[in-house]
Image (cartoon, grey):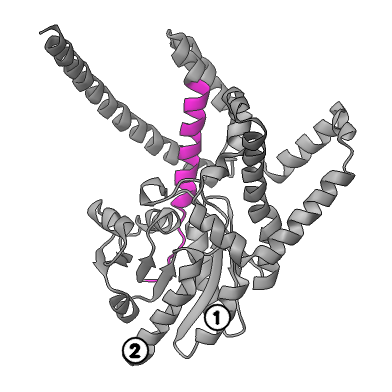
Amino acid sequence: MRRANLDENIAILRREIDKIDKKLIRVLEKRIRLSQKIIKRKIELGLPITDIKREKEILENLKNIAKDQAVKDSIPQIYELIFKISKEKFLLNKNIDIPFKKIGIIGVGLIGGSILKGLIKNKELEIFGLSKKDKDAKLAYKEGYLKKLISIKEMVENCDLIIIATPINTIIPIAKEIKNIYKKNFINNKILIIDTGSIKDKIVKEFEKLTEGSIEFLGTHPMAGSEKQGFVNSRGDLFLGYPWIISPHNKNSNVNLRKIKKLILRLGSKPYILNSQEHDFIIARVSHLVFLISKLIFIYTYEMNKNWLKYAGTGFKTTTRLTKANPILHFQILENNFRNISKEYKEFIRFLNKFDIKKLISIKTLKKYKKLYERTFPN
């Protein structure tokens, strides 16, 4: 009987929490709307969007209001996120035309889903997902993000842009299937197909062969992601402020390059042009080697003494978080860009062997690299 009463009390308290949560969301949405008006007015007056002094004042005022110490301690973290959301929302709503009317997304997972969420605010745009073998697309459709689930054939017949956001080893087979459907059904409408794979040379070479007449394939790679996967973890601001590389081939038109640049800018990303070989070489160092080292640090610690891991703090967990990323994705990256990754790995080992660790036992040196990092990545 006491258990039943306890459960009823919990239910009552939870209903109260639900009511408060609803009010909090409405108030937060109102705050963000007001901040959008302020940012817009600042831009009209030529003022910077960020006012550090004002943000510090807000944080101090809220700390003085808060009575609960846990709430007081959490205010900077909570409000820094609110400030960030307000600025990002404005940047994502910039008035950049999307030069496409109907877009098909094959693979509505983390990347494809984030593209979808970043574009869905445009009411004139129709976005479609794949009707077969895509649980993420079904979820996105159920939640109202996709207009309709259709076949690849229907995408080719109706869309002016198709985005292939699937694992690396499936991109070329899907591209070939699209080309076969296009030729077999004598489709004449202009259509552009892009991918989001993190290796480019092999894909771009095949894309050049497949490009013919009104059907054009273009290789791209958004330099943003997460160790998490699936549509449930996708977010409309995933690409905001990050590079998005375009790797054209000889048959790509300037018209379509301009269109994709506009699409990338609309998603809040920064478009860069790199040929496919240069892309794979550079990304091996700034991306693929990074997740390899992340995994190796975890493996090294685990294999040497796994019991030590219970003492690991945020630094270790942050540095090694990519260990829990999609193993299929990382396998395919290592497999397809092995030559470049292997070369960079050997270069890194040579660097470690030459580097005098005593150099780091210096405030001056540590400050130097801190400043270099902050200058390179100001946000």
Q: Main secondary structure of the magenta part?
A: helix
**Residue 152: image x %, image y %?**
32, 75
* SS of the residue under disc 1: helix
Residue 253 visible in the displayed image: no
Find the magenta span and give its range.
75-100
Is residue 11 depicted above or below 370 in this figure?
Answer: above
**Count of numbered labels shown in the rendering:** 2
Q: x, y percentage for residue 84?
A: 50, 37
Q: Quadrant of the N terminus?
A: top left
Residue position for label 2: 187
Is 149 placed left or right of 241 in the picture? left
- Determine whether 195 is above or below 228 in the image: below
**Residue 124, image quadrant:** bottom left
Q: Residue, x 73% and y 41% (percent of image)?
A: 373
Query: Residue at point 62% right, 35% down?
Result: 302
Give residue 206's mark: 1
Asked whether, in this view, residue 130 is left or right of residue 302, the answer is: left
